Amino acid sequence: MELSVSHRVLPARSRTSWSRRRRTQSGAALVEFAIVAPIFFFILYALIVFGMALALKQSVTNAAAEGARSAVGLSGAAAEAQAESEARDRLGWLRPTQQAVLQVDATTATCGSGSGECITVVVSYPYQGNELVPPAPIINYLAPKTVASQAVVQIS
């Protein structure tokens, strides 16, 4: 007696119930994608917006510090001009329209201890209205109004 092996894995009844189940779920993946995709892309875009704002804050802080350091050894108006120039150079990656609204202020004064001259460099960027990446509606309320930093260095 020989055994014959059928190539069917599932009996006919199981196959029909499986195909019936597949037909009732048609389009479910599309509906799930339509619900999840906007949320996913909004979160991704929010990460990009906040990442760029953080990069700007870091650059503004660095520009103020480097501007103040570049004035070491100079005094008066020459120190202020050098500090402002260096701070603007550090933010050279901004577009020309963004550089136009950038505010850099360097002032020299006697240090608090009375021993020498100090320079104070303040770099300020009005973020609202000059965003690096166009914000989404909800993100716009969470964005900072101004990104600013200050550095003080004794120059003489």
Image (cartoon, rainbow, N blue to C red):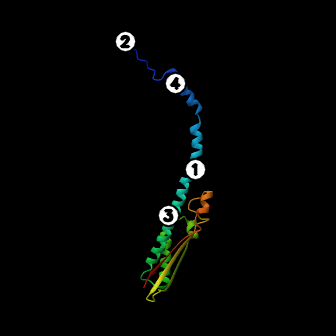
Q: Earlier in the sequence, mark 1 or mark 4?
A: 4
Q: Earlier in the sequence, mark 2 or mark 1?
A: 2
The label shown at residue 123 is: none
Q: CA distance from mark 3 to mark 4?
A: 57 Å
Q: Could you tell me which residue is drawn at 51 percent across and 24 percent down?
A: 14
Label 1 CA crowd tier, 10 Å (few <14, some 14–19, many 20+): few
Q: Earlier in the sequence, mark 3 or mark 4?
A: 4
The label shown at residue 39 is: 1
Residue under label 2 = 2
Q: Eyeballing the image, is 42 above or below 18?
A: below
Label 3 CA crowd tier, 10 Å (few <14, some 14–19, many 20+): few
Residue type indicated by callout 3: Ala
Residue 102: image quadrant is bottom right
Residue under label 4 = 15
Along the line of sight, which residue is nearer the eye, 41 or 3? 3
Q: CA distance from mark 1 to mark 3?
A: 24 Å
Name of the residue lying farthest toward the left: 1
Location of the C terminus (image quadrant):
bottom left
Residue 127: image quadrant is bottom right
Percent across and percent down for residue 91 are 50, 68
Q: Earlier in the sequence, mark 2 or mark 3?
A: 2
Q: Eyeballing the image, is 28 above or below 63?
A: above
Residue under label 3 = 55
Q: Could you tell me which residue is drawn at 62 percent across and 62 percent down?
A: 141
Percent across and percent down for residue 67 are 47, 75
Residue type indicated by callout 1: Ile
Q: CA distance from mark 2 to mark 1?
A: 61 Å
Name of the residue lying farthest toward the bottom: 114
